[in-house]
Amino acid sequence: MQTRTKYKEVRFFLVFIAFVSAFNYYLTYTNIKFNGFLLLTYSLDTVQGWLAWWAVRSLVIYLDKKVPYNPDPLKRILIQLVSTTSAGILVIILLTELVSWIARGRPALYNFYTFDLFIILIWFFVLNGIYIGLHYYHVWQQSEHQRQEEKKLRSGGFTVRLGDQNLLIAFNEIAGFYSEGGYTYLQTLTNKKYLTVLSLDKTEKLLPEESFYRLNRQYILHRNAVTGFKRAGDGKLEISVKTAGAIPDLISVSRTKAADFKKWFQPGEA
């Protein structure tokens, strides 16, 4: 399961766009007079920039859900560049024309379309570069987290976050893992529950096979949590679990996995 990037960049862009607006004035005008009119126009341009950025941000978050980077990152990047730049430029044009009609009763100056809009276009490419960079930084963070997780697992436990703390839960204290509502949870034998950052598929790959077994798409159990099993209809097995809480007392194992489970649970028997 690919995790979506969690953006925490709002404060940065509020300051960044205010700076960009000021820098655009420096590029556009040779003689800048600091007065009330300059403050008014600068404020209007900055607000326009914030609204255009918010349109870009909303589109990026939407694309994260509908057109993820994997399996075709180039396609995603091209779609993002075209859609966000078009949306941002459209917001700028509409707001500029609106302000021009209200203030002067006429369309925006020709210079806006021949010069100003070109500079603004460049900034939209910079915006996209930042968001693409944030995504791959997030991917790198996830990769580093998994690498650290694998190191800690070798020491005999699984790491979870609880507020600002990182807790190492020993394997022999874990009842199992389960998936619910798109999230993966760790449950201990004492019925404490922790949210994990990995999918159930990725979690399974990090666990020692001799101690943990993937019963089905929803549950992975530790041997200490399994008290036995009985045969059910159609060759299935019903696994008895001694933990309470979110993990049920009985979990079904399919006919195709029944023999494999028996070998895991009773390794000394044929």
Image (tube, helix red, strand yellow):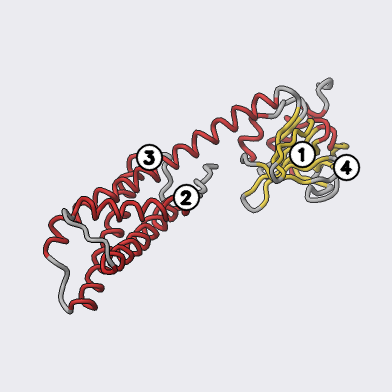
- Could you classify mark 4 by the number of other residues whose Cα lies within 10 Å: few (under 14), some (14-19), or many (20 or more)? some
Q: Amino acid at mark 1?
A: Gly
Secondary structure beneath label 2: loop
Left or right: 257 as drawn, with respect to 2:
right
Question: Can see residue 91?
Answer: no
* Front position among marks 3 and 2: 2
Q: Nearer the viewer, residue 111 or 159?
A: 111
Position of residue 117 relative to residue 172, above or below, is below
* Front position among marks 2 and 4: 2
Q: Amino acid at mark 4?
A: Lys
Task: Tell me which numbered mark, 1 or 4, is placed earlier along the sequence.
Answer: 1
Residue pointed to by mark 3:
72
- Could you classify mark 3 by the number of other residues whose Cα lies within 10 Å: few (under 14), some (14-19), or many (20 or more)? few
Task: Tell me which numbered mark, 1 or 3, is placed earlier along the sequence.
Answer: 3
How far separated are the C-alphas under marks 1 and 3? 35 Å
How far separated are the C-alphas under marks 2 and 4? 46 Å
Secondary structure beneath label 1: strand
Identify the residue at image location x=15%, y=60%.
113
Secondary structure beneath label 3: loop
Marks 1,3: beta carbons within 8 A: no
- Could you classify mark 1 by the number of other residues whose Cα lies within 10 Å: few (under 14), some (14-19), or many (20 or more)? many
How far separated are the C-alphas under marks 2 and 1? 36 Å
Q: Whole-percent x and y of residue 90?
A: 26, 63
Residue pointed to by mark 2:
9
Residue pointed to by mark 4:
242
Position of residue 8 relative to residue 70, above or below, is below
Left or right: 26 as drawn, with respect to 255:
left
Task: Tell me which numbered mark, 3 or 2, is placed earlier along the sequence.
Answer: 2
Task: Tell me which numbered mark, 2 or 4, is placed earlier along the sequence.
Answer: 2
